[in-house]
Amino acid sequence: MPLKMRGVLLKVALFCLIAVVSPLHMTRSTFLLTTSLQIFPSFDDPMNQKDVRVAEFRTSSRKESSSSSPVPPKPFAPVKFLVPAMRIRYEIDRLTTELDDPMFKLPLPSAYPLLLDSRTRTYTLRKAFDTYTGSLQFGEDYTLNVEGGQRKEMIRNDALPSVKQTITADLDLRDLYRNEILTTVQDLRAELDFEQRSDLVDVGELKGLVEKLANNMRLWLEGISKEDRQTALEIVKNST
């Protein structure tokens, strides 16, 4: 066969091959494109738009939560209910300062109506603390302040305290500190009365009692936010 004829036949065969292969290639491309659209659906798909809205809503909610006012720590009560107890704290602080004065002498000025006035009944002091604890709002969860090993053991033994037990324990602890304060106030009044009648001043004994008062007051106030304590104390100072 002449060489020229072979070239013509080769071109015809190549053209036919292209004509056959091209549709297959297009079909494969179309299949890949369709598959891609199924794996990565268009944002015009209503279902996909729903998913996007949910994601945006969650993100928006998270941003709003972070930018809004912080949630008060639990247990929590409005500051106004803390003011009566802070009046006692204020008198303890003043009495501490007075006893530290080298020129201290008896009788004390009548500037301590809650701590030193015998007409102030124990009931009044108790109510000052109970006004706050009776207004506490507790959350539905709590932080377990134990070591990791002890926590795991409690979980294994199904010994984690319930929310009710935790609330009861919190209130019992506050009542314990309150009762210590009430007892120490009675001891302080008795000591002052004795020293005034005997004309014998024992500053060390008085300081010890006031330090005990201050320590139990500090323990009672633990768990209350610093901001609330400062606000309540300012209210007391401004009203004195």
Image: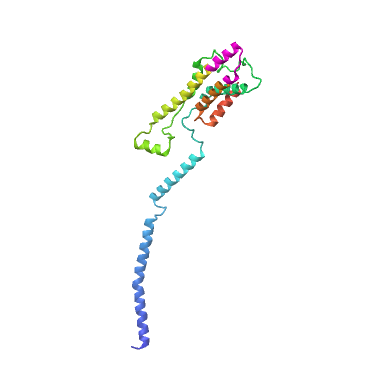
Camera-nearest residue between 100 and 75: 100
Quarter occupied by residue 13: bottom left
User: Residue 96 at x, y = what percent?
Assistant: 59, 23
The colour scheme applied to this rendered structure is rainbow
Camera-nearest residue between 175 and 34: 175
- Where does the N terminus fall, quadrant-wise? bottom left
- Where does the C terminus fall, quadrant-wise? top right
Residue 190 part of the magenta-drawn span:
yes
Q: Residue at x 40, y 50 (%)?
A: 48
User: Residue 79 at x, y = what percent?
Assistant: 52, 27
Residue 133 part of the magenta-drawn span:
no
189 lies left or right of 145: right
| Residue 239 in view (yes/no) | no
Q: How many dots with numbers?
A: 0
Camera-nearest residue between 232 and 59: 232
Residue 168, compared with residue 22, is above or below; it is above
Residue 51, compared with residue 125, is above or below; it is below
155 lies left or right of 107: left
User: Residue 220 at x, y = what percent?
Assistant: 50, 26
Q: Residue at x 38, y 59 (%)?
A: 36
Could you tell me what secondary structure mostly forms the magenta stretch?
A: helix
Quarter occupied by residue 152: top left
Residue 62, compared with residue 138, is above or below; it is below
Q: Residue furthest bottom?
A: 2
User: Residue 33 at x, y = what percent?
Assistant: 38, 61
Q: Residue furthest top?
A: 197
Q: Residue furthest right?
A: 103
Q: Residue at x 51, y 40 (%)?
A: 67
| Residue 9 in view (yes/no) | yes
162 lies left or right of 94: left
Numbered range of the magenta stretch:
187-206
